[in-house]
């Protein structure tokens, strides 16, 4: 006729405002928790994806700040120091190396970019080796420049959108007043390539008035000993070696503080929700002591009362958890944008990765913490003596 | 006692002391009595005379300080350690139904759900259909989907009576069942209890200050200073 779950559910409806506020607390904490756990997982995956999409596992550049080197590797940056092209040829002869590609990174100030001007980043890449290292790059329109000295450029998806350029249009290299013809526009990759303008190496060297490069990308043979290669590369004078694992470690170090902070926030949010649950259920138990006593005269055992009150907690936490997870899924993109604003470096693609497994894990955590919070009120309710409650002497 | 009638409850020397040390109060002083199946007993007496204390002991809501109690052929109190809450609950749900001055209906449950409430915790065999039968018997069928806040005090007490009877108890204990009701509703509830006793053969033990209600019982027991004056 009526189940314990129905009784528990209807009990929660007695003080609707209180139940609603407690529910809001649980919803918010589960939203925060699933988003932050999603970020913890998503950031690392996005970083790995970014590095994998580089096409090479090791970069060699002139000695400098390792953080700058790591950022330059992933994000592009002004070539602060230059190296001779011959260094690449020397590296290519090593048995562990499958291929090398020389790169010149250049940044020019564009007064027409944004409100107060901005930096336009150019990648000078070797047309013989670079496309082969990045076979996953797909063209929306056009293709790579024909010839190593052509005054042509390939624009990343976002760069083309920002500059509103189509294949066949021209772009003007800021500061240098050199025109390049757009011959290809890449499909969106979700990486830093989207904002980059690729130019043949020799062309960019000519534009910049340089005969050097900033970076050498090294693709390692499948089963080669990367550590041995790195050790050999370190022997090169005034060279800095940045490998996949180093970059990852460097960036993970950079965001470690942020990760600790966000996880602390999640724990605090969880604790606040827990206190809210204890308060709500305990208040409800105190108010219903007479009724609980009467339930006991009707034959309810202490364990029955414990389970009844615990069921109320379970309903609160499960519904709050499900709602919070739903909101986290619905607003994942917003969370992504907020996280990007506060991070020193954000890889491309999805930063807050929420999947079914993570949702289930969060729900389990919320329900487990909620049930733990419900133990004391439920235990207290189970101990109510019917005689005391009938007398009203509690 | 009618020859051949069954004794459903027998108390011998029931005593209840409250407090500790020199501040002890003797609420009940060696009360002995027998109740037969089908009896409708009214306990009357001034406040503090011990009638509620006695009914609480008879209904296994409390442990006596001394004395023995047999209910439905089972020794409940006497000769051993006080019973724990779990044991008392087990006895209560098998033997007793209770109604009180305050009805203690759950405001968010409908009339029918309130009546069915004890079945969520304990269900005796053969109680299927009892909710509908009792609602019809007590004239509350048309109110089955109403909430307690939508019915009168007299109707609430009818619901409480139905709830107390849903598990087919051997004994109904009523502590001031009309204490919150006006004269007309008191009369209605009195008639219901009388009919349950007379027609259904239900054993009823009632505490009341109301002489008219007390006179409806088959036996009236006057109490004073923790003792029975007239059994």
Image (cartoon, rainbow, N blue to C red):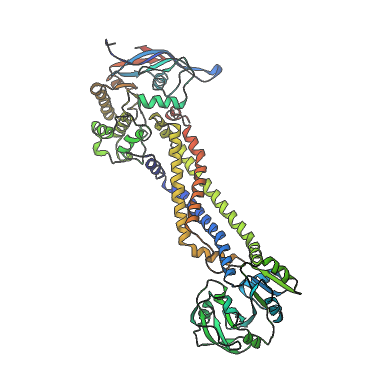
Question: On the picture, is A258 further left or further right than A308?
Answer: right
Q: Is residue B211 visible?
A: yes
Give the camera-side residue of A336 and A265: A336
Give the camera-side residue of A33 and A125: A125
Q: Is residue A196 visible?
A: no
Please say if A156 is above or below B141: below
> At x 33% / y 27%, what residue is drawn?
B177
Please say if B89 is above or below B221: below
Give the camera-side residue of A302 and A111: A302
Where does residue A308 sit, x and y in percent of width and height? 43, 38
User: Which corner quadrant of the image does residue A2 belong to?
Assistant: top left
Where does residue A208 sit, x and y in percent of width and height? 66, 86
Question: On the picture, is A154 further left or further right than B114?
Answer: right
> At x 41% / y 30%, what residue is drawn?
A296
Locate the N terminus of chain B by quadrant.
Answer: top left
Give the camera-side residue of A86 and B140: A86
> At x 35% / y 35%, what residue is drawn?
B117
Please say if B93 is above or below A376: above
Where does residue A316 sit, x and y in percent of width and height? 45, 47
Please say if B202 is above or below A213: above
User: Which corner quadrant of the image does residue A105 belong to?
Assistant: bottom right
State how many labels appear.
0
Question: On the picture, is B151 further left or further right than A139?
Answer: left
Locate the C terminus of chain B by quadrant.
Answer: top left
Question: On the picture, is B40 further left or further right than A274?
Answer: left
Where does residue A74 sit, x and y in percent of width and height? 61, 71
């Amino acid at each position: 006729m009526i189940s314990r779950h129905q009784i528990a559910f209807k009990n929660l409806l007695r003080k609707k405002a209180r139940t609603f506020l407690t529910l809001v607390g649980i919803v918010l904490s589960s939203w925060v928790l699933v988003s932050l756990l999603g970020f913890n997982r998503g950031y690392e995956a996005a970083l790995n994806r970014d590095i994998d999409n580089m096409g090479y596992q090791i970069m060699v550049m002139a000695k400098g700040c390792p953080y700058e080197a790591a950022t330059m590797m992933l994000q592009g940056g002004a070539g602060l120091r230059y190296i001779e092209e011959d260094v690449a040829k020397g590296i290519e002869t090593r048995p562990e190396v499958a291929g090398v590609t020389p790169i010149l990174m250049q940044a020019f100030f564009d007064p027409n970019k944004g409100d107060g001007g901005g930096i336009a980043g150019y990648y000078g890449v070797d047309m013989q080796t670079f496309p082969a290292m990045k076979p996953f790059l797909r063209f929306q329109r056009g293709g790579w420049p024909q010839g190593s000295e052509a005054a042509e450029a390939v624009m990343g998806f976002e760069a083309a959108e920002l500059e509103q350029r189509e294949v066949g249009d021209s772009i003007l290299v800021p500061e240098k007043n050199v025109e390049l013809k757009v011959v290809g526009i890449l499909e969106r990759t979700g990486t830093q390539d989207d904002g980059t303008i690729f130019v043949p190496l020799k062309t960019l060297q000519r534009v910049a008035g340089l005969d050097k490069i900033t970076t050498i990308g090294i693709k390692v043979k499948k089963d080669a000993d990367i550590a041995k290669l790195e050790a050999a590369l370190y022997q090169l004078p005034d060279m800095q070696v940045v490998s996949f694992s180093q970059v990852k470690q460097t960036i993970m170090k950079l965001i470690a503080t942020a990760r600790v902070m966000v996880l602390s926030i999640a724990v605090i949010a969880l604790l606040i929700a827990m206190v809210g649950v204890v308060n709500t259920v305990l208040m409800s138990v105190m108010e219903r002591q007479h009724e609980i006593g009467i339930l006991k005269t009707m034959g309810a055992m202490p364990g029955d009362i414990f389970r009844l009150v615990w069921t109320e907690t379970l309903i609160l936490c499960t519904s709050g958890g499900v709602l919070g997870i739903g909101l986290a899924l619905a607003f994942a993109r917003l969370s992504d944008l907020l996280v990007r604003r506060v991070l020193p470096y954000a890889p491309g693609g999805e930063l807050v990765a929420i999947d079914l497994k993570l949702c289930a894990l969060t729900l389990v955590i919320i329900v487990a913490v909620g049930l733990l919070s419900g133990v004391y009120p439920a235990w207290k309710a189970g101990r109510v003596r019917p005689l005391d409650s009938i007398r009203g002497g509690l | 006692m009618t020859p051949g009638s069954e004794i459903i409850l027998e108390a011998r020397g029931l005593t209840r002391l409250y407090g500790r040390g020199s501040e002890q109060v003797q609420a009940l002083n060696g009360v002995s009595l027998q109740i037969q199946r089908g009896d409708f007993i009214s306990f009357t007496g001034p406040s503090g005379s011990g009638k509620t204390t006695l009914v609480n002991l008879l209904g296994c809501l409390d442990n006596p300080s001394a004395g023995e109690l047999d209910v439905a052929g089972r020794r409940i109190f006497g000769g051993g350690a006080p019973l724990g809450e779990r044991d008392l609950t087990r006895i209560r749900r098998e033997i007793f139904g209770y109604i009180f001055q305050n009805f203690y209906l759950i405001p968010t449950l409908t009339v029918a759900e309130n009546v069915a409430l004890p079945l969520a915790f304990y269900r005796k065999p053969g109680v299927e259909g009892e909710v509908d039968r009792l609602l019809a018997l007590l004239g509350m069928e048309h109110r089955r989907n109403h909430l307690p806040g939508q019915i009168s005090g007299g109707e609430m007490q009818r619901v409480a009576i139905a709830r107390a009877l849903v598990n087919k108890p051997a004994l109904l204990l009523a502590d001031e069942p009309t204490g919150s009701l006006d004269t007309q509703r008191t009369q209605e509830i009195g008639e219901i209890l009388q009919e349950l006793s007379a027609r259904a053969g239900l054993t009823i033990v009632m505490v009341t200050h109301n002489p008219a209600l007390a006179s409806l019982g088959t036996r009236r027991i006057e109490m004073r200073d923790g003792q029975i004056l007239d059994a």
